[in-house]
């Protein structure tokens, strides 16, 4: 009996402690809301460089390397929205339908298997909360994203996301991504190039190999085409632009010139000086390098 009473007391105390801790976390979430106006200047964001080296970089309209929305192609912007957050322009920082579907999937699997983060939530997570998958982090992310949506405009959130996002090993921001993968500025990105960059976002280090090999796997090709279809349905591109994007080559890789065997002759003719137009020019392999 005495042992049972001790167990009961321990359970009650545990519940009280957990309840107190939970209450403290809830209070912290509601009272320690960040000043989101600071994103209009510059913010120090944690990043990971190749070799799992932890570092930081400054992101924001006043930070070096910032690319404003006006200097990013509409097709690239549309590709990211179509891939990551189709309700971005209408939601209030969170997508309740996606959240419900994600919770259902997570409960079925008994673990976090499906993300439901909007672009706004991803900005909150990367700037303020880190990547640890806990319910309390998700709760803060969910609440703070709604607060951020009331402070910043959609254009401000979208620009910060595009300049903050990781696009490959040590590649951060759409400016670096456009140069690294295509040797272009963000303003010059095509619809298909934008769709490819959007494919990278869920797992940029893993999917970076598609660029290294200059070839898409069947899965990646299907994913690019799916994003293009969503862009078409959301009117980011028109039918003619969609058709052109489907047949566009992401990377122009020159095939080696065929070697033609010339049979030997009894008398070799004197070499004639060939004109510049007749000479076969060397075509350098296009291998854009990341620019820091």
Image: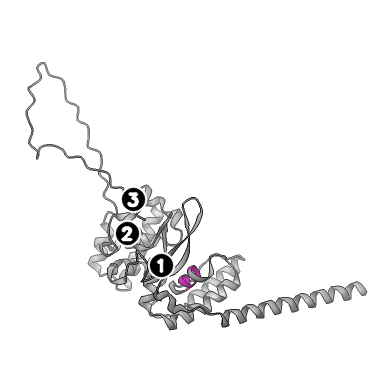
Q: What is the spatial separation of the Cα atoms under label 1 and label 3, in whole angstroms?
A: 22 Å
The boundaries of the magenta stretch are 121-126
Q: In which quarter of the image is residue 221?
A: bottom left
Q: How many marks?
A: 3
Q: Which residue is drawn at 46% across and 54% down?
A: 206
| Mark 2 → mark 3, Cα distance in angstroms | 11 Å
Q: Of residues 235 and 208, which is closer to you in this image?
A: 208
Residue depth check, mark 2 versus mark 3: number of the one nearer the observer: 3
Vertical placement of 181 versus 107: above or below?
Answer: above
Q: Indicate the secondary structure of the residue bearing disc 2.
A: helix
Residue depicted at x 48% and y 68%: 126
Residue pointed to by mark 2: 178
Q: Main secondary structure of the magenta part?
A: helix
Query: In percent of the image, x 13 and y 37: which residue is there?
Result: 279
| Residue 183 locus on image (x, y percent) | 28, 55
Q: In this view, does 260 lie above or below 289?
A: above
Residue at numbered disc 3: 289
* Secondary structure type for disc 1: strand
The image position of residue 272, as x and y in percent, is 6, 28
Q: In this view, does 143 lie to the left or right of 253?
A: right
- Residue 128 location (% of width, % of height): 51, 71
- Around disc 3, counting alpha carbons within 10 Å, would you say few (fewer than 14), some (14 to 19), or many (20 or more)? few
Q: Position of residue 49 (x, y in %)?
A: 46, 55
Report the residue marked by disc 1: 59
Between disc 1 and disc 3, whose residue precedes?
1
Element type at marker 3?
loop
Which residue is rendered at x = 41% and y = 67% of the image? Answer: 59
Is mark 1 in CB contact (under 8 Å) with mark 3?
no
Q: In which quarter of the image is residue 111?
A: bottom right
């Amino acid at each position: 009996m005495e042992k049972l009473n001790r167990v009961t007391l321990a359970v009650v105390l545990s519940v009280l402690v957990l309840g107190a801790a939970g209450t403290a976390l809830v209070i912290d979430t509601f009272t320690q809301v960040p000043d989101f106006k600071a994103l209009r200047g510059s913010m120090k964001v944690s990043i990971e460089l190749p070799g799992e080296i932890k570092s930081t970089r400054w992101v924001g309209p006043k930070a070096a390397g910032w690319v404003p929305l006006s200097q990013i192609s509409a097709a690239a912007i549309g590709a990211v929205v179509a891939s990551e957050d189709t309700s971005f322009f209408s939601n209030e920082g969170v997508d309740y339908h996606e959240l419900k579907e994600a919770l259902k999937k997570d409960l079925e699997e008994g673990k976090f298997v499906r993300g439901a983060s909007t672009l706004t939530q991803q900005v909150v997570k990367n700037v303020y909360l880190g990547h640890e998958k806990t319910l309390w982090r998700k709760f803060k992310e969910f609440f703070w994203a709604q607060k951020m949506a009331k402070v910043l405009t959609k254009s401000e959130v979208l620009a910060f996301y595009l300049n903050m996002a990781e696009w490959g090993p040590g590649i951060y921001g759409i400016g670096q991504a456009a140069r690294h993968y295509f040797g272009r500025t963000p303003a010059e990105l095509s619809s298909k190039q934008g769709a490819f960059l959007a494919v990278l976002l869920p797992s940029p280090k893993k999917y970076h190999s598609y660029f290294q090999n200059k070839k898409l796997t069947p899965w990646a090709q299907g994913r690019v085409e799916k994003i293009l279809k969503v862009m078409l349905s959301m009117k980011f591109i028109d039918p003619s632009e969609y058709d052109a994007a489907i047949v566009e080559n992401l990377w122009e890789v020159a095939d080696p010139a065929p070697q033609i065997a010339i049979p030997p002759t009894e008398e070799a003719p004197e070499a004639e000086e060939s004109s510049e137009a007749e000479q076969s020019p060397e075509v350098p392999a296009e291998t854009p390098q990341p620019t820091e």
